[in-house]
Image (spheres, rainbow, N blue to C red):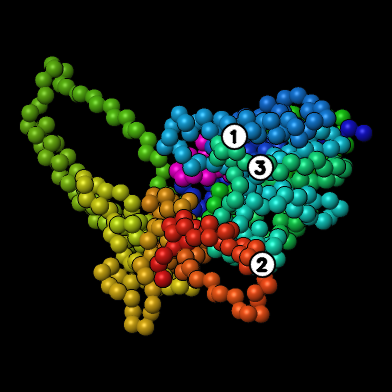
């Protein structure tokens, strides 16, 4: 019996992010997915570095030491990230998740760090075979949160382990392989917005290409708030499997976005302006047969042309102003998060946007829209939303501008931003109460369990917000 892989890989920027920081490699022996982080450009550099370092594992038979080879390649990639940061200090803070499988026929090796995931579909049942390296998952493991509560927890994106160039503990496992197994590797751009039940139903139908396409489509139809990347691989018993590797996402260097769905988020994403292409202008000169220009004719045509240009210019300004005034997006103004009217940028030094409304957020995370310069309505206890109230990874996106379209679409975009990216309130420290007479036998160790872990999370502007 010869077990081989048949695989498909897809990656999409999503409907909110300005660039794709995910990188993916799928080959006959190696399946690897990395979700970069660290702001514009830096995250995609980290994911490219780790995938490029692992790619050589796909070239030769892995032999028996599957996890040894995975561990060595992963640590080499992590060291490459450290070297890149040393050469370019402005990349400090970049990092990436990694979930990778090294296929060895009857067995496979699995390396995992971060919150990307690997699933196994076997005999119609879907099982997550990786554990999220997140703070929220640690609360679930400790019995302090249910799985449903974890899915909507404001700190669900807080990663405890990632490849940043620093020493990190890898999760390495060896698993038995069977004919008919279907493996899914995915970034949190899928698992955060598509339920496990829906993922299972999708994986149970069609070949690996159709399943991968459908999963990307489902993530986009759910709002596509993040880059979304998937690998779907089937274990089959044939003499020869696929051999040509697939690269997608940042590491491919290509724009591979899926056609946008007909949803409000999809229509908003479609409004992103394309990159400007240089325009070539060819100038020709005409003359009379004897080489002279008829002066009167030239003068007349010059005035006609000037008048036509002025008419077109005035018409263009009127149309452009109408279009600009009817467009809304979520952006930044003086470090505040605002719904902006217009488009991002300026023309001849004149801003093409203005603040329409600011968001005033209360302690529950609910938002009230207020006009610039106005305070909260009577009876509403809230404060103006600032960039520092959002998780660090979302701030750069707001500075760039989140495309929307109509006002209600911009409000929907802002509400989604608060739902997914708002930091929890910093909790005021409380002094410990002294022990009662009946409790004098309790040990100091018992009374301080859990305090160091919680105190480390109280970092205003990083893990919590001070607005209230």
The residue depicted at 30 percent of the width and 70 percent of the height is 371
The span picked out in magenta is: 35-45
- Between label 3 and label 1, give the one nearer the viewer: 3
Quadrant in which the N terminus is drawn: top right
- Res. 341 image quadrant: bottom left
Which class describes the residues within 10 Å of circle 2: few (<14), some (14-19), or many (20+)?
few
- Between label 2 and label 1, give the one nearer the viewer: 2
Q: Earlier in the sequence, mark 3 or mark 2?
A: 3
The residue depicted at 31 percent of the width and 65 percent of the height is 356
Residue 443 got which mark? 2
Real-space Cα separation, disc 3 to disc 2, in angstroms: 32 Å
338 shown above or below 77: below
Check disc 3 and report the residue beneath it. 169
- Res. 281 image quadrant: top left
Check disc 1 and report the residue beneath it. 78
Q: Secondary structure at mark 2?
A: loop
Residue 386 painted magenta: no
Say whether residue 110 is left or right of residue 452: right
463 shown above or below 114: below
Real-space Cα separation, disc 3 to disc 1, in angstroms: 11 Å
- Direction left: furthest residue: 296
Q: Secondary structure at mark 3?
A: loop
Q: Secondary structure at mark 1?
A: helix
**Foreground pick, 282 / 100:** 100
Give x and y (percent) for residue 230: 66, 46
Say whether residue 343 is left or right of residue 438: left
- Res. 78 image quadrant: top right
């Amino acid at each position: 019996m010869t077990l081989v892989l048949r695989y498909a890989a897809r990656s999409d920027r999503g409907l909110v992010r300005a660039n794709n920081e995910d990188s993916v490699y799928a080959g006959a022996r190696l399946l690897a997915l990395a979700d970069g982080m660290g702001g514009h450009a830096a995250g995609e550099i980290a994911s490219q570095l780790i995938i490029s370092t692992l790619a050589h594992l796909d070239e030769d038979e892995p032999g028996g030491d599957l996890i040894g080879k995975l561990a060595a390649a992963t640590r080499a990639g992590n060291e490459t990230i450290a070297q890149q940061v040393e050469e370019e200090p402005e990349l400090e803070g970049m990092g990436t998740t990694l979930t990778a499988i090294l296929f060895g026929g009857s067995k496979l090796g699995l390396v995992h760090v971060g919150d990307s995931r690997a699933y196994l579909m076997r005999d119609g049942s879907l099982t997550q075979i990786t554990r999220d390296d997140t703070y929220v998952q640690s609360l679930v493991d400790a019995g302090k949160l249910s799985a449903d509560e974890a899915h909507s927890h404001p700190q669900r994106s807080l990663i405890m382990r990632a490849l940043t160039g620093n020493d990190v503990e890898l999760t390495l496992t060896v698993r038995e392989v069977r004919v008919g197994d279907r493996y899914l590797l995915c970034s949190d751009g899928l698992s955060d917005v598509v339920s496990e039940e829906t993922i299972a139903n999708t994986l149970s139908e069609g070949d690996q290409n159709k399943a991968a396409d459908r999963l990307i489509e489902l993530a986009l139809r759910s709002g596509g708030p993040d880059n979304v990347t998937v690998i779907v691989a089937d274990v089959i018993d044939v003499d020869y499997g696929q051999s040509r590797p697939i690269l997608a996402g940042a590491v491919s260097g290509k724009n591979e976005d899926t056609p946008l769905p007909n949803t409000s988020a999809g229509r908003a994403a479609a409004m992103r302006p394309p990159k400007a292409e240089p325009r070539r202008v060819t100038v020709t000169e005409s003359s009379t047969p004897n080489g002279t220009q008829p002066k009167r004719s030239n003068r007349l045509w010059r005035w006609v042309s000037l008048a036509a240009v002025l008419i077109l210019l005035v018409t263009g300004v009127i149309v452009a102003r109408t279009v600009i005034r009817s467009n809304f997006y979520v952006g930044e103004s003086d470090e505040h998060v605002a719904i902006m009217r217009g488009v991002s940028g300026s023309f001849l030094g004149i801003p093409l946007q203005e603040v329409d409304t600011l968001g005033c957020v209360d302690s529950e995370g609910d938002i009230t829209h207020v006009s610039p310069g106005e305070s909260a309505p009577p009876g509403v206890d809230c404060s103006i939303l600032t960039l520092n109230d959002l998780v660090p990874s979302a701030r750069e996106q707001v500075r760039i501008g989140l495309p929307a379209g109509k006002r209600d679409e911009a409000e929907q975009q802002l509400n989604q931003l608060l739902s997914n990216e708002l930091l929890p309130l910093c909790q005021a420290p409380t002094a410990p109460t002294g022990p009662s007479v009946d409790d004098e036998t309790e040990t100091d160790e018992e009374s301080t369990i859990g305090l160091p872990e919680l105190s480390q999370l109280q970092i205003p502007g990083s893990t919590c917000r001070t607005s209230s």
